[in-house]
Amino acid sequence: MFRQIIVGLDGSEKSKTATRVACELAKFYSGTVTLLHVPHAESSAFVVGAVAGYHAAIMKPTFSEIEEAGKKILDEGLKIASDVGCKDVKTHMPHGDAAAELLAHADEINADLIVTGRRGLGGISSLVLGSTTQRINHAAKCACLSVV
C-alpha cells in the first residue's frame, strides 16, 4: 500500500515526528522512505544559529551555512530512521520552493504517501496548518499524512 514514502523535513520537532511515523509505515509495508529537505535561510538560520551560538535575526547565513544546515537536518532524519529500524532510506536536497520541490519529487519517484509535520518552523500565519503542508495536501497526487 505505502511502498514509496516521502517525508518533508524542515528541522522542526513535527518533521522529526513525521520521520518516525513514515519509517514505522515503511517497515510495516516493506517500503522505501525518501527524506527531503529544501534548504532556505529561515530554517537554516534556526539550525546554524543554534549550533554556532549567534542570534538568527541578526546574521543571515551564507549559502554554505545553508547547505551545511540542510545536511544536518537530513543527517538527523537518517539517525531517526536508523533508531526506528528503517533500513531503506534515501535523502534528497533540492533548492527552490519547499512544497513545489516535494510535490515534484513525489511525482518523480511515484510516491504513495507524503508525510509532513502539521506545522513546521513557520510563524503565526501557520498556526493551524503550515502553509507548506497545506499546499502539499491540496496539490498532491497521492495520499498525504500530516502529523502532530
Image (cartoon, rainbow, N blue to C red):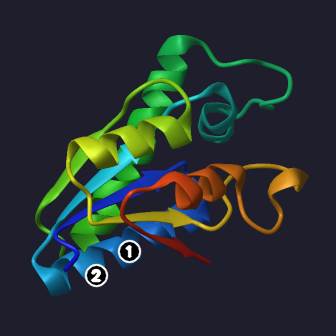
SS state under label 2: helix
Q: Nearer the viewer, residue 64 or 28?
A: 28
Crowding at label 1, few (<14), some or many (≥20) Cα neighbours within 10 Å?
Answer: many
Crowding at label 2, few (<14), some or many (≥20) Cα neighbours within 10 Å?
Answer: some
Across and down, in percent, residue 72 comes to 42, 41
Please give left or right for residue 28 compared with residue 81 in the image.
left
Across and down, in percent, residue 129 comes to 73, 65
Please give left or right for residue 38 compared with residue 92 in the image.
right
Across and down, in percent, residue 142 comes to 36, 63
Q: Where residue 20 is drawn, which disc sits there?
A: 1
Quadrant in which the C terminus is drawn: bottom right
Compared with 147, 90 (above or below) is above
Compared with 70, 62 (above or below) is above
Q: Residue at x 77, y 31 (%)?
A: 56
Q: Nearer the viewer, residue 2 or 37?
A: 2
Q: Residue furthest right?
A: 124
Q: Residue at x 11, y 62 (%)?
A: 88
Name the kind of residue labelled 2 in the image.
Glu
Dividing the picture into quadrants, the one containing residue 126 is: bottom right
Q: Residue at x 19, y 80 (%)?
A: 1
Dividing the picture into quadrants, the one containing residue 91 is: top left
Q: Residue at x 71, y 57 (%)?
A: 130
Name the kind of residue labelled 1 in the image.
Arg
The residue labelled by disc 2 is: 24
Could you tell me how far apart the alpha carbons at marks 1 and 2 are, in whole angstroms?
6 Å
Residues at discs 1 and 2 in contact (Cβ within 8 Å): yes
Dividing the picture into quadrants, the one containing residue 105 is: top left
SS state under label 1: helix
